[in-house]
DNA sequence: TAGATTGTTAATCGATTAACAATC
DNA sequence: TAGATTGTTAATCGATTAACAATC
């Protein structure tokens, strides 16, 4: 039906790399969400999308979408919209998905195992290469296709296998030591679930702190606030 | 040493509730982090803190801290700073911590169990009252002190026990049905780990979507960007 | 061509920072 | 009192939205 989908839009209007402003942080923060929606559209077989269709889907303004996408390239085509596959690919590129980073998980507890079980990594082109723990009862066992290794091997392993990402799911008390060890072994980024803010000023490493508790608290606030203002407000009556 | 810590500052300058501007969303988003840092200070036995001390600790400007805290009350005292315990309590109050909400976890898979294992809920005054699954092999077993129940009971249970929060750790395919069921049974907020954005326009329920993958992607971006700009830039040389 | 939709500018809005008078 | 530190105003900065000419 939508035979215009077949028409390959002209996407070569930037033959030479133009000097562009750096992408603002607010835009970067939104990119993973765009990537997700575009991925879903792609899976659903949708070939093209306009900023106004996408805006309805995502609950943001069409203006913002056009503004955002234009920060890093003129990917649309007037009168046509955006090519879903192309745009999805461009955002992947910009975000560093499929750079082939290798990740290790340190801490084979509940959370470590839960993360090991997901397809989260491979879906983003990140290879889960090993899982570490210090519990002798676990070392040597297999978890989702990965042998559990001793943390004693961690440093050597990261160096040897050029590990880029360390997923930290160890107790607070051990977090600093392990994180520092990984940074020294060349790990570039630490995904920190240890429920504390890791600051490693002397190490050249990026830390992404996850605080699920903060999110739970935000939910409590929203529930409390909605309740306080009346669950069935009469503003619209 | 710090005997001035013992002096109870005067905190009764707002005897009557003054009309205040609503707290801006940017401030609300920052409150859980303040709460965390103040909690840590409290545990460390610190009684008072100035905006400039806290700013160094948290890596934000002192100006922002004072501005933020003033949105919802004059909690400090000139020449003294802020009383850690009092401020921590006020933020708890504002966020709805200790409102005594009850939570159920739906999905006793890896992630459901990992969340069940944490002290995240009780620490925020939320009671974990039950865990549900549809796997007959799990139903009846105990997980961290909670009996696994059948999802067939979910609706009745939520109604009967006045459950406020539903933690959703089921596969995507089941998420909508379960979420809608909970909303119909009076659940006020859904903490959604199903890796899709739950929109329930017909239900009067708040949804907090968790997308760990987005965070992993942000980490990839930061790694890629840092690398691209030279790991040891010479800007400072 | 006519219709659709982008890219981009300008206007608005909100959030952050700086500065300092108020005051403990 | 003198010193410290807040509360608050004003200035700056960045992010969002609206509008429309460019163009496919």
Image (cartoon, coloured by chain):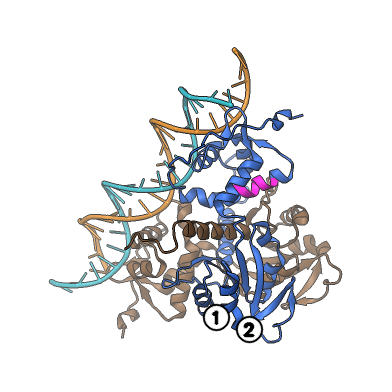
Chain colours: A brown, B blue, C cyan, D orange
Q: Secondary structure at mark 2?
A: loop
Q: State the residue at coordinates (35%, 76%).
A: A8
Q: Specify the segment rendered in magenta.
A: B34-40
Which chain contains the residue that carries disc 1?
Answer: B
In the picture, measured across the screen, residue B116 lies left or right of residue B67, that is right
Q: How many marks?
A: 2
- For residue B174, the mark is 1
Most foreground residue, A103 or D3: D3
- Percent across and percent down for residue A216 are 59, 60
Q: Label 2 belongs to which residue?
A: B134
Using the rendered image, report if marks 1 and 2 lie on a common chain: yes
- For residue A54, the mark is none
Most foreground residue, D20 or B42: B42
State which tag comes first along the sequence, 1 or 2: 2
- Above or below, B42 against A63 in this view is above
Q: Is residue B38 magenta?
A: yes
Judge whether residue B155 can be spotted in this image: yes
Most foreground residue, B166 or A38: B166
Q: Is residue B217 magenta?
A: no
Judge whether residue A178 can be spotted in this image: no
């Amino acid at each position: 039906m939508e035979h215009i989908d077949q028409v390959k839009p002209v996407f070569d209007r930037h033959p030479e790399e133009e000097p562009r402003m750096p992408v603002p942080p607010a835009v970067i923060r939104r990119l993973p969400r765009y990537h997700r929606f575009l991925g879903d559209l792609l899976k659903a077989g949708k070939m093209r999308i306009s900023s106004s269709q996408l805006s309805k889907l995502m609950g943001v303004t069409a203006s913002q979408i056009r503004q955002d996408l234009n920060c890093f390239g003129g990917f649309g085509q007037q009168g046509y919209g955006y090519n879903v596959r192309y745009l999805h690919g461009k955002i992947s590129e910009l975000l560093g998905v499929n750079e082939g980073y290798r990740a290790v998980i340190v801490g084979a507890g509940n959370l470590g195992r839960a993360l090991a079980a997901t397809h989260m990594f491979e879906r983003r082109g990140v290879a889960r290469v090993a899982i570490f723990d210090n519990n002798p009862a676990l070392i040597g066992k297999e978890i989702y296709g990965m042998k559990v290794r001793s943390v004693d091997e961690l440093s050597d392993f990261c160096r040897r296998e050029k590990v880029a990402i360390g997923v930290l799911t160890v107790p607070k008390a051990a977090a600093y030591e392990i994180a520092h060890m990984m940074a020294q072994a060349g790990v570039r980024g630490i995904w920190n679930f240890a429920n504390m803010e890791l600051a490693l000023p002397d190490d050249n490493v990026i830390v992404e702190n996850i605080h699920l508790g903060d999110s739970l608290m935000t939910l409590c606030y929203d529930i409390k606030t909605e309740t306080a203002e009346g669950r069935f407000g009469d503003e619209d009556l």
